[in-house]
Image (spheres, rainbow, N blue to C red):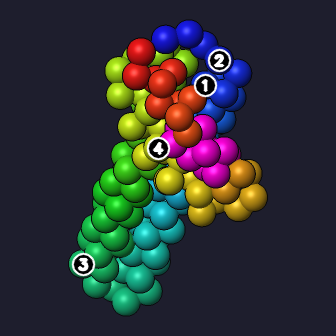
Amino acid sequence: MQQTPHTKILSIGFAVFAAIFGITFLLLMLTSLGVFVAMGFTMASETGDSTHAGIGILGGLFAIVFYGVLAVLFVFPTGLASWKLFKGRRHARLWGIIAAVLILPVLPFGTALGVYGLWFLLSTQGKQLLQQ
């Protein structure tokens, strides 16, 4: 597959959104962990019951798992689509469509890139180019 301006724009845009998603979920994970653990230790020191600290730690671990799952669901497909489009690998069109749908709700740039990606990837030119 030859590199076209459309695939280059999409691969760079998807890479940027994968990085934004990754940094956002990492910051949310760390912030939630700190808040839950601090709340647990504060409750434990105020009430004198040490089990409240465990509840805070458990809440922090739940936040890590929750944001970790969200990160995998958003960062992995978007980053993989970027790499496959840039390198011209198999299934680049499929992963590009998945990534375009994932970033559609991110206003305004995600919506613009998602619509542009769907327009190109679902067009006859995109089908022909990415099936060679």
Classify mark 2: residues with Cα within 10 Å, few (<14), some (14-19) or many (20+). few
Q: Secondary structure at mark 4?
A: helix
> Does the residue at mark 2 contact the one at mark 1 (Cβ under 8 Å)?
yes
Circle 2 residue: 4
Q: Position of residue 25 (x, y in %)?
A: 51, 52
How far apart marks 1 and 4 lie (CA) works out to: 12 Å
Q: Which residue shows up at 44% across the image and 86% down it?
A: 46
Mark 4 or 3, which is nearer the eye? 4
Residue 2 x/y as whole percent: 56, 10
Please tell me whether mark 2 sits on a helix, a strand or a loop.
loop
Give how far apart the Cα atoms at labels 2 and 4 are: 17 Å
Element carrying mark 1: helix
Mark 3 or 2: in front is 2
The residue to which callout 3 is attached is 51
* Residue at horizontal 50 percent and vertical 68 percent from the top: 35
Q: Position of residue 8 (x, y in %)?
A: 65, 22
Q: Quadrant of residue 55?
A: bottom left
- For image coordinates 49% across by 53% down, the residue present is 102
Q: Amino acid at mark 3?
A: Thr
Farthest-out residue, right: 108
Mark 2 vs 4: CB contact within 8 A: no
